Image (cartoon, rainbow, N blue to C red):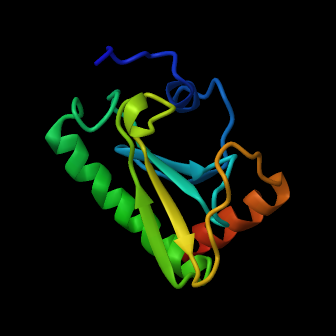
Amino acid sequence: MSAYDPDNVFAKILRGEMPCTKVYEDDVALAFMDIMPRADGHVLVIPKAPARNLMDIDGDVLAGLIQRVQKVARAAFKGMGAEGVSIQQFNEAAGGQVVFHIHFHVLPRWSGVSLRPPGVMGDKAAIAANADKIRAALD
């Protein structure tokens, strides 16, 4: 496994060098909208602490992070009027990881609605509107 790269896109977002549509932020985590959403309301939750993936993240940081994933998932479920939520987390290229800063995907789901294919840019206005719905539903 390679070392953590402090110049990955999520590290740049954390440093404010790249933009994002924030949904939630505290001292532990940042949650923001995926620009290539596989579902309406697709949110990414990342720790502020540098970690490549599940194998190298500190256990205490992971415990705090998963609490934020749950908080965001509840808001996405409620705010998007979803029937369910899928949580995805990938590790290393062979496991499907593309950005090598640990992150969780929160995907609101509806019966009979398939996920969109990966790698397709979303509509900025729709992403912003979905972010507003999720932010409004945060506890």
Query: Which picture quadrant has residue 126?
Result: bottom right
Q: Is residue 129 left or right of residue 101?
A: right
Q: How many marks?
A: 0
Q: The N terminus lies in which quarter of the figure?
A: top left
Instruction: Give whichever of 12, 93 is nearer the camera.
Output: 93
Q: Compared with residue 19, is residue 31 higher up or lower down, i.e. above or below?
A: below
Residue extending farthest to the left is 59
Query: Which picture quadrant has residue 110?
Result: bottom right
Q: Compared with residue 32, is residue 106 higher up or lower down, i.e. above or below?
A: below
| Residue 91 place in picture, x, y as percent | 35, 37
Instruction: Give whichever of 65, 109 is nearer the camera.
Output: 109
Query: Which picture quadrant has residue 27?
Result: top left
Which residue is at a point 59% across and 59% down the rendered structure image?
Answer: 42
* Whether residue 138 is visible: no
Q: Is residue 36 left or right of residue 97?
A: right
Q: Compared with residue 14, is residue 73 higher up or lower down, i.e. above or below?
A: below
| Residue 130 place in picture, x, y as percent | 70, 66
Residue extending farthest to the front is 94
| Residue 123 place in picture, x, y as percent | 83, 54
* Whether residue 50 is visible: yes
Which residue is at a point 69% across and 47% down the rendered structure image?
Answer: 36
Which residue is at a point 76% across and 66% down the rendered structure image?
Answer: 129
